[in-house]
Every structure is written in structure tokens, then in C-alpha cells.
Image (spheres, rainbow, N blue to C red):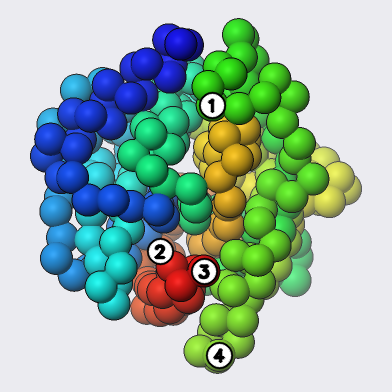
Amino acid sequence: MGQIYDAANAVAQHIREKCDRKVELCVVLGSGLGAFVDALEDKVVIPYSDIEGFPVSSVKGHAGNLVFGRLDGKDLVVMQGRIHYYECGDLKRVTFPVRILYCLGCRRLIVTNAAGAVNEAFNAGDLMLITDHINFMQASSALVGPNEDEFGPRFPDMCEAYNKEMTDILRQTARALNIPLQEGVYAAFHGPEYETPAEVRMAQKLGADAVGMSTVPEVLVANHMGMKVAGVSCLTNKGAGLSATKLNHEEVMECGRKVAKNFISLLSEGVRRILTL
């Protein structure tokens, strides 16, 4: 067995000792988006710091909890915050929680993030359905190194990184709830600095609609393991050079709070529908 596989199973067993629910779906919440857990019933909250071996984020707006809960009687688990590459410099560590979730039985994953809009037709406060991504992280792929055959193949296909069925459910959900929902390509830089205006222009020319500092490593690893993935970005600001204001994390957090109602409504109803698949 591979080292990561064994380690992920060991952490999963530690989690089962605290909460032994069977969960098939996980939601990963990005900066300022943790309020989604308020929609859950019968919650069991486990701080990451209480789970031996579970990576802990130090970023403001990432509560750092693993939350088991129910929607309409169906179980799911929520990562209330994530660790980023810029915090630890180790993509294996960044993606380790997704490996653990797989070992817990999760086979569907919804990723969310706060992102900057580089499509000039998009505005701060918009929600964007992620249809594809571009990996601009200089650190390259989270799959570099010996392959863990227990998880997946050496060369995983990425033609449908974001599952069409789950993505379509979120699209239909937004339409049913009358929630405006943009669609586009998410580009990941490793940060922690915000992109320069020149990098934003590059991202535009290469087909990106939004930029951020997360998500892509987790999606790569999830696809490696055969998990079905859907993603939503909360566009918290215009990209560098597209507005007169300088970027800051407080702006990201404040915009997350402003769109919380639509975000929670979309995610809650979308998750309900996906759980019926």
C-alpha cells in the first residue's frame, strides 16, 4: 500500500471514532463562505486541530472545521475552510484532506472559493459556475511523485474535470431559484500575492474568467480518484488593473458576507438535488 493511502485511511479511522456517519458527498468552503453550515441539521463539528494528521489553515475566514450534517435527512460532510499551497508549500499536504474524504466514502465533491473576476462582463458579487480550469501554479501538479495506485491511475484523464451532470444540476438550481449565475473558467495561481495587472491580462488572453489561489489541486486529486466534482466561485472583486481600487483580503471577506444568501440558497438546493442522484 502507498504511504499517502495508509496515512489517509488512518486519519479517516480517527474521524470515524468521533463521528461514524456514512457520507457520499463533501462540500469544501472557501474564504468567507463558511456560513453554509448554518443550513445543516443534526451537526457534528470537529475542529481540524482535533484530528491528528489533518492539515489546518491559518487564513482568516477559514474556520477550520469538519462538519457532518444533514439536508432533508441525507448525510454530507463539509470542510469549513481549507489549507492553501502558499501556507505550506506542499501540494501533497494541500490535497491530503480530499484523500481522507475519499477514504471516508465520499465520491462526490463540490468545491467553492472566493475569486477575482477577470472577465470584464463579470462583477464583484457574482457567483460563477466553474466549467473548467487552468493550472497556473508554478508548483505544477499535486500528482507529481510516485503514483498511489490504490487511489487511481498514473495518468488520469481530465476531459471532464467538472462533472457535467452535477454542473447541470447547479445550473438548473440557479435558474429555478432565480439566482444569477455566471459560467466560466477558473485559473489558479499559487499566491499569496494577488495577481499583477499583466498576469490578469495573460489569464484573459488564455481564456480564464476568474482567478484564485486554491481549488485546482483538490480537483486534480479528486479526479485522480474517480470522484465527481462540481465547483462554484464567489467573485469578490475585479482582477488587478480592472478597477481603481487595490485588492485586500477584507474586501474578499466582506463580499462573501454580502452574497451569502444567494450562495447558501444555491448550494443548499443544489446539494439536495445532487444527493438524490
Say what secondary structure mark 2 lies in: helix
Q: What residue type is labelled 4?
A: Ala
In the drawing, does residue 64 fall left or right of residue 7?
Answer: left
Q: Name the residue under label 1.
A: 151
- Given the current orientation, which residue lies at the most extreme right position? 205
Say what secondary structure mark 3 lies in: loop
> Whole-Å distance between the Cαs marked 1 and 3?
23 Å
**Residue 5 percent location from the top left of the image:** 43, 19
* Residue depicted at x 51% and y 89%: 177
> Whole-Å distance between the Cαs marked 4 and 1?
37 Å
> Whole-Å distance between the Cαs marked 2 and 3?
29 Å
- The residue mark sitting in front, 4 or 1, is 1
- The residue mark sitting in front, 2 or 4, is 4
Q: Residue 176 carries which label?
A: 4
Q: Name the residue under label 3.
A: 277
Q: Name the residue under label 2.
A: 256
Q: In this view, does 116 lie above or below 17?
A: below
Asked if marks 4 and 1 touch (Cβ < 8 Å), the reply is: no
What crowding class fits label 2: few (fewer than 14 Cα within 10 Å), some (14-19), or many (20 or more)? Answer: many
The first of marks 4 and 1 along the sequence is 1
The first of marks 1 and 3 along the sequence is 1
**Residue 148 percent location from the top left of the image:** 55, 17
Q: Which amino acid does label 2 sit on?
A: Gly
What crowding class fits label 3: few (fewer than 14 Cα within 10 Å), some (14-19), or many (20 or more)? Answer: few
> Whole-Å distance between the Cαs marked 2 and 4?
22 Å
What crowding class fits label 1: few (fewer than 14 Cα within 10 Å), some (14-19), or many (20 or more)? Answer: some
